[in-house]
Amino acid sequence: MRLTAEIAGKRVELAFDTSKPQGVRGRNSDNARLAEVLGWTPTRSLREGLGETYAWIASMVGAPAVSGAGRTSSAAASASGFIRP
């Protein structure tokens, strides 16, 4: 949540209700099997991918894209092929 808020340029206040069940604490991906079987490895960090995705969504809804948190500008997303001219 913190990374997404940072990329979006939003300030959020997180509140945790410790009286409720915690659920899944986190999910981690081990891409070793993908690399072994398919020869695929990620080309972007999570921050870069989320930044490009946010910029693309912002361009689709007409919202201003925020830059400065990874590759989050519309120009970066366009250069990466996420936005078609």
Image: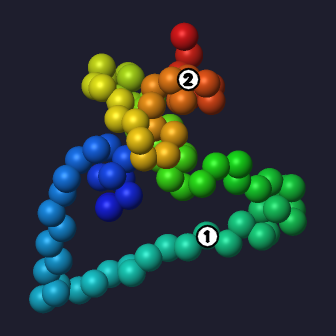
Instruction: Tell me where residue 84 appears, x and y as whole percent.
Output: 56, 16
* Residue 70 left/right relative to 59: right
Mark earlier in primary sequence (2, 1): 1
Instruction: Tell me where residue 42 appears, x and y as whole percent.
Output: 70, 53
Q: Amino acid at mark 2?
A: Ser
Q: Which is more toward the observer, 1 or 40?
A: 1
Q: Callout 1: helix, strand or loop? A: loop
Instruction: Tell me where residue 8 appears, x and y as whole percent.
Output: 32, 43
Where on the picture, by quarter, is residue 66?
top left
Number of the label disc, if any, that sits on residue 78: 2
Residue 26 seen by the camera: yes
Asked if residue 82 is positioned above or below residue 35 in the image, the reply reads: above
Q: Please tell me whether mark 2 or mark 1 is closer to you in this view.
A: 2
Where on the picture, by quarter, is residue 3?
bottom left
**Residue at (82%, 62%) from the top-left corner?**
35
Crowding at mark 1 (Cα within 10 Å: few <14, some 14-19, many 20+): few
Crowding at mark 2 (Cα within 10 Å: few <14, some 14-19, many 20+): some
Q: Amino acid at mark 1?
A: Ser
Task: Measure the alpha-carbon separation of dots 2 and 1.
Answer: 27 Å
Number of the label disc, if any, that sits on residue 29: 1
**Residue at (67%, 72%) from the top-left corner?**
30
Asked if residue 77 is positioned above or below residue 14 in the image, the reply reads: above
Residue 53 seen by the camera: no
Where on the picture, by quarter, is residue 59?
top left
> Where does the N terminus fall, quadrant-wise?
bottom left
**Residue at (19%, 53%) from the top-left corner?**
11
